[in-house]
Image (cartoon, rainbow, N blue to C red):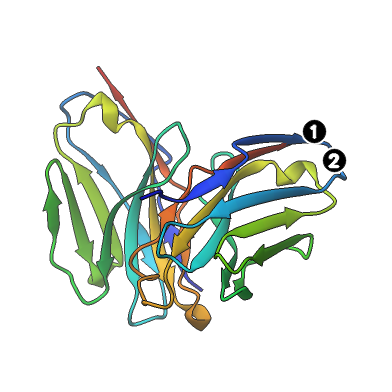
Amino acid sequence: AQKVTQAQTEISVVEKEDVTLDCVYETRDTTYYLFWYKQPPSGELVFLIRRNSFDEQNEISGRYSWNFQKSTSSFNFTITASQVVDSAVYFCALSENQGGSEKLVFGKGTKLTVNP
Amino acid sequence: DAGVTQSPTHLIKTRGQQVTLRCSPKSGHDTVSWYQQALGQGPQFIFQYYEEEERQRGNFPDRFSGHQFPNYSSELNVNALLLGDSALYLCASSSLRTGTGRVEQYFGPGTRLTVT
């Protein structure tokens, strides 16, 4: 069965520190998508990135970067020079294509607190 | 262009009552998925509607039912509410017709349901 594990429940850093959020996934699909979402206190899930299973190229977007390694079934997310506005809960998710429904399987999330 | 909208924002119900939550998908989207997010947990897939039919269902009892209207909006109904149904209910929209569901799912702000 598909599963996403985010082992870090909570992380607290001081502003300007770099922080990496870990994500490990399990799937039998050969074609799948991985996502990261940010959930601020308001509750709405904000899409950050998606990556398909055939593209292991790392991606950088401003202070954000993602490291996808199929060999270890990991899709880690790094924030460089963290800011207070980065404080939120971050979810890693796997797109599961059962019957074409394309449902998302989420991890339990990592709560990031960036202190000034 | 309006994003995904949900109503109401907050709701308080008593155990045993019934509740209806509403979702309007992003313009151009034809598919609505519902997720339940308990406190401190990741969202869990309830079901998905496309062409006014339920395509896929997660591990939720029959007390949870839904409907999709011709304009693609959707309702989530929960009967015989239990205390454990207290959660944030998220709606996500995508387009199965154009095949973007695996790569783009836009979430609404959610409805926070409290059962007392």
Disc 2 and disc 1: Cα gap in Å?
6 Å
Q: Mark 1 points at which residue?
A: B116
Front residue of this view, candidates A54 and B69: B69
Residue A23: quadrant of the picture: bottom left
* Left/right of residue A21 with respect to residue A7 in the rendered view: left
Residue depicted at x 63% and y 34%: B10
Work out whether A83 lies above or below B8: above
SS for dot 2: loop
Chain under disc 2 = B
Q: Name the residue under label 2.
A: B15
Q: Do the residues under discs 2 and 1 have CB atoms within 8 angstroms?
A: yes
SS for dot 1: loop
Outermost residue, top side: A116
Q: How crowded is mark 2: few (under 14 residues within 10 Å), some or many (20 or more)?
A: some
Residue depicted at x 40% and y 59%: A93
* Left/right of residue B66 with respect to residue A68 in the rendered view: right
Work out whether A111 lies above or below A31: above
Residue B45: quadrant of the picture: bottom right
Q: Residue A104: horizontal and vertical position, in percent?
A: 46, 64
Q: Residue A11: horizontal and vertical position, in percent?
A: 34, 34
Residue A54: quadrant of the picture: bottom left
Q: Residue B17: horizontal and vertical position, in percent?
A: 85, 44
Residue depicted at x 48% and y 69%: B30
- For the question of whether residue A13 can be seen, the reply is no
User: Which residue type carries mark 2?
Assistant: Arg
User: Which residue type carries mark 1?
Assistant: Thr
Looking at the figure, which quarter contains the C terminus of chain B? top right
Q: How crowded is mark 1: few (under 14 residues within 10 Å), some or many (20 or more)?
A: some
Chain under disc 1 = B
Front residue of this view, candidates A63 and B63: B63
